[in-house]
């Protein structure tokens, strides 16, 4: 048996914490090996060691059977190891080819960059692995799925044989995930080795051959995917039994809290993104909005929160017309909002955690008096939220938000929004990029908000999430409502057809 | 990658800046020790080549005098920067501050003391108004504030010339400045018997430093300014008025420089003057803010450093060195701060080597 990568008995200590404790990871050549673990389990540290960003405290690394010392990322590249990062490292105003060759530009005999030759090579590689990428397209003009394929091409262009995918599906739509799985299989066929870092069990089931589980810096074990089912995987990862379906009782909807009437919204390019959209959400129910990415959900949410002004129609919250109210007035009217993009909208990453927790109320009593911040009050409040919602970070409330893990950043947002006591909770993609433990926790919170009589509008691209949480499901396609169905009367198949616009159900508004 | 404190980076940059300047002096056949002698003299007034003369307090006073305006302009640049903007309009704001101060000095008769304060406040107000336009255009139309600021610098320069030539009481002997300010306008003199023009203007500088610290770190207004500076979209999503913040922050930045314009005009000159070229206080403010990493104590330090370099120029010249050497030091420091990731990289390399050594020794 030959291994492409062997990391043997790796231990890495940071001041005060052992991030990796005697971890052994062996990746067999020409297979897909998954590395499974919750946020903070030590996956990133292990990968940073493989890439020479950190030196292990003890342990050895072998590549293709030979022991190596990787002291910086260039050495890793030379050894044929390449990585597709979760957050792409691409330049928006460059073309696909320019991004791929950046740092390794082929030269013509005059010493200029041989862009023609590079384009040809990129096209060939794209063809060979079935990536369907246009070498001349600008990054800013292509979708997220395509951008990821550019990242893959970057590695292929550099002749990497060992490809590491860091949470590759976190940003993809279900269709794009399917395509990515296909691409991975193609890569294996062409002789590559893949190390897949993820916490999505379904994906491991779908593509991986073997997997290694990390938990709290320790190696739990390496198993064959075929021998283990998803429930067992989740248990290994979290260390306790996990349920995938959230327990909840029948909804007891009360009066209407949010009423969206004939809303029309244009997108940034001035095209109609939301067309004559009507939907109402009642107290004590969760309405899920399902749809494929880019069908107007983002614009709808922008309009609901006051980020953009709708063209026409109205938004009524608890009987008050907030269609043209400012963002602040939306919050004051009783809306809490977990935004889709937590880095851009949900948080100020360069703020301390405690500052982010009071970002809506920093200028009000008790957090500020006569314009002066009340440090004590802010600290007490932050500590309470951190405790109550189990937000973990290095230095507690004084942690820089940027240094926190994605899951804990999201928990901080959820804590802040749920504690606001709003009547409407507008939750967008609440569990994107989170692990099963955190997802379970957040789902429970959402249901408990409902049980306390809050109205919840859940916008998600994950159909599983919609099916799991919603009492009613609305489907959006091309900016139009294609129907509203009761959760108990529908199934994935029907929703899929509605999401693609093939089936329309007369809106049976309650 | 390890993180380093901003102050560590700044100190290293300053050290290397002086080192590079020494090298250059060495290459051009001069003794770099003389540079340090000159700078020490400018700092504490002690001449190492003539130790018998003792300490001359004139020098430290002039050092502080030179530091006053650059601390203020440094605060200005830093304040705008914390809100995500670049105030390169300091030159213009400085000139309109001086101009407004001159107007109040001649046309608003007030009792002594109050008159001076009124002049300084008028300078601050004028600076704020001058900075309003770039802030407003940035907030409403997303027009780059740098371009507007630079254009307004020249507008201020010529507006000032026009006003002094045509409106204000010009000094007919020189035709280049106004007549002396009335006696009610004065920042006094704190020269301890020397010829220094050091004055009570430093009180305004200390107030400005405290205000900066208080607004940015302690108030809810500062909180929203910092949020806007770090992530404008995020701040907007949190319900903050980023347009209001943008305009107000530029205006406050302008006010700091306007005050500098007023205290230099009153304290150093005592009359309104035509500017042939920019005084460079506004641009020096950029250096100060960068060296100080936009922190209150850092700006104080940066301001004192740039002030020192400014006040050392004459001594340097007297000792046979070109005064450009101070510009060179300043430029080196700035470049090094601009490439601070390079410094971090080197520090990391040194540290990892140390780590290895420790391990091998163990």
Image (tube, coloured by chain):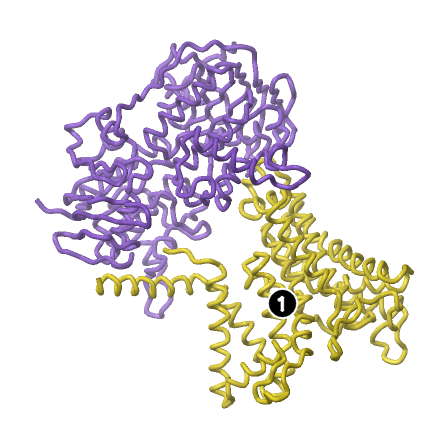
Chain colours: A purple, B yellow
Residue denoted by label 1: B284
Instruction: Give the chain of mark 1.
Output: B
Side of A494 relative to A236 (left or right): right
- Location of the C terminus of chain B by quadrant is bottom left
Q: Is residue B147 left or right of residue A51?
A: right
Tag 1: Cα neighbours inside 10 Å, few (<14), some, or many (≥20)?
Answer: many
| Label 1: element kind | helix
Q: Nearer the viewer, residue A297 or B298?
A: B298
Where does the image place residue A319, in percent across and percent down from the top left? 63, 16
Question: Which image quarter holds the N terminus of chain B?
Answer: bottom left
Residue A228 image offset from top left, x and y in percent: 17, 27
Q: Residue at x 35, y 23 (%)?
A: A464
Is there any visible trace of residue B93 in the rendered image? Answer: no
Residue A103 picture location, percent across and down: 35, 60
Observer-nearest of A500 and B131: B131
What residue do we see at 64% from left, 63% from top? B71
Q: Is residue B173 left or right of residue B269?
A: right
Question: Would you place residue A404 above or below residue A102 in this image?
Answer: above
Identify which residue, B346 or A138, lies in the foreground: B346
Up the image or down, A299 lies above or below A142; here it is above
Residue nearest the observer in this picture, A194 or B229: B229
Based on the displayed image, in which of its 4 quarters is residue A174 positioned?
top left
Q: Position of residue B259 (x, y in %)?
A: 74, 60
> Eyeballing the image, is B133 above or below A25?
below
Residue B236 occupies quadrant: top right
Q: Residue furthest left?
A: A1
Instruction: Say which residue appears at 74% left-offset and 56% top-offset.
Output: B130
């Amino acid at each position: 048996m030959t291994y492409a990568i062997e990391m043997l008995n790796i231990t890495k200590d940071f001041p005060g914490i052992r991030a990796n404790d005697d971890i052994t990871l062996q990746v067999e050549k020409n297979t897909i090996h998954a590395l499974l673990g919750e946020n903070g389990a030590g996956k990133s540290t292990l990968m940073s060691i493989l890439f020479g960003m950190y030196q292990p405290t003890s342990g050895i690394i072998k590549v293709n059977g030979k022991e190596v010392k990787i002291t910086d990322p260039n050495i890793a590249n030379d050894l044929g190891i390449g990585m597709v990062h979760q957050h792409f490292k691409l330049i928006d105003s460059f073309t696909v080819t320019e991004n791929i060759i950046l740092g390794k530009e082929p030269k013509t005999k005059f010493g200029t960059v041989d862009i023609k030759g590079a384009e040809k090579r990129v096209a060939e590689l794209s063809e060979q692995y079935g990536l369907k990428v246009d070498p001349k397209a600008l990054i800013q003009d292509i979708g997220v799925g395509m951008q990821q394929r550019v990242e893959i091409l970057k590695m292929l262009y550099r002749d990497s044989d060992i490809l590491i995918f860091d949470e590759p599906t976190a940003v993809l739509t279900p269709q794009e995930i399917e395509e990515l799985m296909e691409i991975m299989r193609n890569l294996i066929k062409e002789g590559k080795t893949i190390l897949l870092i993820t916490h999505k069990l379904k994906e491991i089931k779908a593509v991986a051959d073997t997997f290694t589980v990390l938990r709290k810096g320790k190696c739990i074990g390496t198993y064959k995917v075929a021998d283990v089912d998803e429930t067992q995987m989740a248990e290994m990862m979290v260390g306790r039994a996990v349920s995938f379906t959230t327990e909840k009782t029948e909804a007891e909807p009360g009066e209407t809290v949010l009423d969206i009437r004939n809303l029309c919204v244009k997108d940034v390019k001035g095209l109609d993104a939301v067309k004559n959209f009507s939907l109402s959400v009642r107290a004590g129910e969760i309405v899920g909005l399902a749809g494929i990415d880019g069908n107007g959900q983002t614009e709808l949410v922008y309009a609901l929160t006051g980020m953009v002004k709708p063209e026409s129609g109205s938004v009524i919250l608890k009987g008050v017309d907030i269609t043209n109210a400012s963002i602040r007035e939306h919050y004051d009217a009783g809306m809490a909002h977990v935004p889709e993009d937590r880095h851009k909208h949900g948080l100020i990453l360069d703020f301390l955690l405690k500052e982010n927790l009071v970002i809506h109320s920093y200028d009000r009593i008790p957090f500020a008096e006569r314009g002066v911040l009340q440090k004590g009050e802010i600290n007490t409040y932050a500590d309470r939220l951190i405790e109550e919602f189990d937000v973990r970070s290095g230095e507690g409330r004084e942690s820089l938000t940027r240094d926190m893990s994605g899951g804990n950043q999201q928990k901080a947002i959820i804590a802040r929004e749920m504690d606001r006591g709003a009547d409407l909770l507008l939750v967008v993609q609440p569990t994107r990029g989170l692990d099963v433990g955190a997802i379970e926790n957040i789902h429970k919170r959402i249901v408990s908000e409902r049980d306390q009589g809050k109205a919840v509008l859940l916008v998600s691209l994950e159909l599983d999430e919609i099916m799991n949480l919603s009492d009613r499901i609305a489907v959006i396609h091309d900016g139009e409502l294609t129907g509203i169905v009761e959760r108990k009367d529908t199934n994935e198949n029907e929703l899929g057809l509605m999401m693609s616009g093939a089936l329309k159900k007369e809106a049976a508004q309650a | 990658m390890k993180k380093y404190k901003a102050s560590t980076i700044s100190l290293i940059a300053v050290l290397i800046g002086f080192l590079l300047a020494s090298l250059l002096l060495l290459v051009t056949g001069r003794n770099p020790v003389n540079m340090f002698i000159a700078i020490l003299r400018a700092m504490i007034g002690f001449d190492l080549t003539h130790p018998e003369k003792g300490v001359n307090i004139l020098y430290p006073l002039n050092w502080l005098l030179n530091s006053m305006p650059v601390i203020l302009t440094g605060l200005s640049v830093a304040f705008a920067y914390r809100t995500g903007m670049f105030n390169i309009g300091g030159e213009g704001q400085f000139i309109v501050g001086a101009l407004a101060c001159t107007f109040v000095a001649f046309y608003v008769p007030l009792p002594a003391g109050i008159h001076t304060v009124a002049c300084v406040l008028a300078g601050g107000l004028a600076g704020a108004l001058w900075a309003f336009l770039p802030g407003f255009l940035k907030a409403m139309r997303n027009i780059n504030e740098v371009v507007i600021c630079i254009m307004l610098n020249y507008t201020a320069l010529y507006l000032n010339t026009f006003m002094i030539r045509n409106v204000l009481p010009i000094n007919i002997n020189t035709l280049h400045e106004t007549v002396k300010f009335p006696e009610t306008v004065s920042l006094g003199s704190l020269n301890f018997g020397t010829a220094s023009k050091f004055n009570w203007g430093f009180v305004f500088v200390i107030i400005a430093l405290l205000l900066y610290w208080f607004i940015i770190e302690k108030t809810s207004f500062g909180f929203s300014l910092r949020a806007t500076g770090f992530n404008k979209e995020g701040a907007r999503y949190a319900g903050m008025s980023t347009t209001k913040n943008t305009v107000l922050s530029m205006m406050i930045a302008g006010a700091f420089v306007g005050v500098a314009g007023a205290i230099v005009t009153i304290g150093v000159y005592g009359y309104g003057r035509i500017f042939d070229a920019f005084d460079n206080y506004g641009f020096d403010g950029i250096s100060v803010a960068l060296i100080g990493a936009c922190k209150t104590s850092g700006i104080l330090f940066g301001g004192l450093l740039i002030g020192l370099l400014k006040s050392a120029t004459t001594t340097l010249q007297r000792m046979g060195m070109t005064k450009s050497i101070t510009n060179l030091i300043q430029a080196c420091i700035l470049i090094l701060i601009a490439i601070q990731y390079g410094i971090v990289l080197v520090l990391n390399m040194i540290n990892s080597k140390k780590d290895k050594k420790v391990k091998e020794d163990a």
